[in-house]
Image (spheres, grey):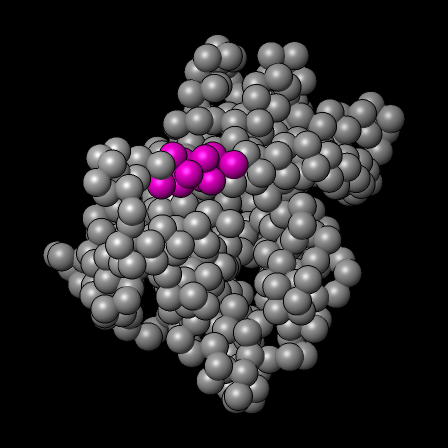
Amino acid sequence: MHQKDQSLEGLRGLASLAVVLAHFLFVFFPYLSNNMRPYPNAKPKTVIDAWLVYPPFSLSYAADAAVLVFFVLSGYVLTAKFYAKNDIELFESAAVRRYFRLALPALASVLFAWLLLKADFMGNQMARVLNTAGWPIHYYTEKVSLDYAVFIGLIGAPFFGNTALNGPLWSLQVELIGSILLFACYALFGRRSLLMTVVWFVFFANILGGRSPAVLNYVAILLGSLLHPIAGWLRRNPWVSTSLVVLGLIAVSYDNSPRFTLLRVISLPNFQPYGPDFNQDHRIFWHSLGAVFLVSGVIGARWFAALLASRIPTYLGRISFAIYLLHMPLIMSLAFWTAKAGQVLGMGYIARGTFAAAIFFGALVVLAELFTRYVDGPAIRFSSWISNHLNAASQRSDVPSDPEHNAPSAESSTDVSSREQVVT
């Protein structure tokens, strides 16, 4: 694999780890969420908590920023072939693949959560007994039917952001709808006007985002795609890319702590009543900007790309989707039961939290590896097969049945050849 591809994979892997760390820590050490999502009456469990709640330590569990990194990476990766070949027909097959690529693994993760719930293995209702954060008790309060679980996996999560059985699946709606919108805008305007591509994408993203700062979840995908035209410039100016890495790390670290008072006094764009007022949510604005800067840094700063292309980040990148899909049901089940076992054994809070972390993360890596091999990999192959099959059927339907038209003209022959290249 090319180093550039490995470095992007590595960035995705570290972002997925940040999401997992955030959810685990916000359960067992809720004080750490205080500067991101203020937790009422939260107190540090240890002296260490009082330090870890601030940057740069909090960067390791900056989950909201990490998800925006996912979106920027998606936009960059999904349009790479278009910028390489300038072929809009690529978007048709990409759109077909995208649904199955996302929905099938999502379905598997929902069924995994459903099985845990069905078997009464969800332990999040022990939150008060274990003195963890209280918010987990609002999850998995009642069992659901198998057919409803299937509905969530195939339709509810990817199209409507349904999180009934797996909280992190909210982002799949953004990934699916946002990528389809991206494909449509590039297919219609990409060859003729990049400006029109941007205008129409932002127009529909504004609607999808409810004219709120959440519109940046979709815009992040567009911004990722727009890094291609400046990729060469970033590589020729590594000092600029290095500066973007530094600025990106600062921006994605943004939280509600006093350390970012200077950024909070900056007046952000306000497009109301027709669009979002970003002053309502400074965090998503700075996190989005930071995510774009970080991906730009991967493209242009060789030292940063080499760091991310090392063994551990790239391995995490390979299993990142599985980690993202499986971690929440596993926290709510295995992590809680492990902490309960520690309590029964007489462990103190810190000891049983550490014990739960060791068991949880070990199990997560093993399950994510199996999920990647036997669910995610087959889903990728199936989505490609469906796309190729539909493209082949489309080509056959394009062939005229009238014998007088059996001999194609030079123009139609070129069109068929072009389509064959797309299929292969």
Q: Image height check: is 324 above or below 187? A: above
Taking the image as shown, residue 343 lies to the left or right of residue 236, namely right
Image quadrant of residue 394? top left
Q: Which residues are magenta?
A: 385-395
Please state which of residues 76 and 262 is positioned toward the viewer in this rendering: 76
The spot of residue 226 in percent (x, y) is 38, 69
Q: Image height check: is 329 above or below 94? A: above
Task: Give yes or no for residue 387 being in the magenta stretch.
Answer: yes
Q: Image height check: is 232 above or below 59? A: below
Question: Furthest residue to the left?
Answer: 273
Question: Furthest residue to the right?
Answer: 345
Please state which of residues 47 and 289 is positioned toward the viewer in this rendering: 289
Taking the image as shown, residue 183 lies to the left or right of residue 54, namely left
Q: Which quarter of the figure is the N terminus placed in?
A: bottom right
Q: Image height check: is 145 above or below 174? A: above
The spot of residue 74 in percent (x, y) is 47, 55
Taking the image as shown, residue 256 lies to the left or right of residue 328, namely left
Q: Residue at x 67, y 18 (%)?
A: 121
Please state which of residues 56 and 224 is positioned toward the viewer in this rendering: 224
Image quadrant of residue 156? top left
Q: Is residue 347 visible to the viewer in this orientation of the structure?
A: yes
Q: Residue at x 70, y 71 (%)?
A: 307
**Taken as a whole, is the magenta stretch helix, strand or loop?**
helix
The spot of residue 172 in percent (x, y) is 44, 41
